[in-house]
Image: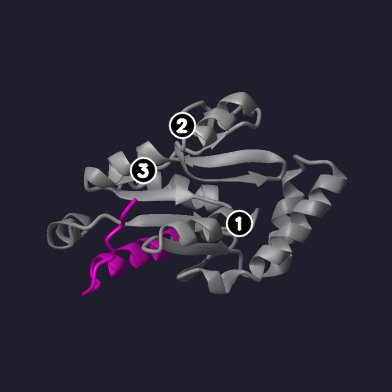
Amino acid sequence: MTEHLYEFCPNPLLIVISGPSGAGKDSVIARLKQRQHPFHFVVTATNRPKRPDEVDGKDYIFVTTEQFAEMIEQNELLEYAIVYGDYKGVPKQQVRQALASGQDVVMRLDVQGAETFRKLVLEAVLIFITPATEDELVKRLQARKTETPDALKIRIATARQELGRLDDFDYVVINRQDNLDEAVDDVMGIIRAEHCRVVQRKVAL
């Protein structure tokens, strides 16, 4: 199915997977990777410390604050923002090379970053990932047990605010508990539909 779409709809897409913390953005992207579709998955640069289970260059490009500042000064980032006290940014050259090769580009951005990115790249396809209910979102955040009580309160409050930004996106996908594949199928359906548009999106960076 994907090969036929690429044959008749050659314009690559720039797809942004976003949503509040706890929505399952990373899980959706991980399952997309497992399905081995011909996408380029953007590796975001960040100055936050690497967690024990993370791999540099795969999960994130880990840099120092000084290195991140230099990337900003050299105009090497398409978009960057401060997320929970840490800098995160999208390397410009990485995205340009993937689009030039004809690959659809998939990137994960927080809601703030996605809104900024839409202003920079009007042709981007913005997909909002969300749990079925706000209560489910809160339970997921609480179940992580990776933050102090105060930090968790801030993250929950921020996530609740972000749920109200749905209108800034093109599509919404509900990531129901224990039904990840359904959410990933919905994302793939959106990508297929975008490739079948009569007037194609043409990304210019």
Disc 1 marks which amino acid?
Gln
Q: CA distance from mark 2 to mark 1?
A: 23 Å
**Residue nearer the viewer, 102 or 23:** 102
Return the mark for residue 112.
1
**Residue nearer the viewer, 184 or 96:** 96
Q: CA distance from mark 1 to mark 3?
A: 19 Å
Disc 2 marks which amino acid?
Lys
Residue matched to label 2: 58
For the magenta stretch, what is the residue range?
182-205
Q: How is the image coloured?
A: one colour
Would residue 60 be visible to someone looking at this image? Answer: no
Q: Is residue 97 above or below residue 122?
A: above
Q: Report helix, strand or loop for mark 3.
A: helix
Residue matched to label 3: 95
Decide: marks 1, 3 in contact (CB < 8 A)? no
Quick one: label 2 or label 1, which is nearer the N terminus? 2
Q: Residue 110 at what x, y percent from top left?
A: 58, 53
Residue found 30% across the figure and 67% down from its top: 194
Pointer 1 local density, CA inside 10 Å: few below 14, some 14–19, many at least 20 = some
Q: Is residue 145 above or below residue 163?
A: above
Q: CA distance from mark 2 to mark 3?
A: 15 Å
In the figure, is residue 148 to the left or right of 190? right
Residue lying at the far right of the rendered structure: 150
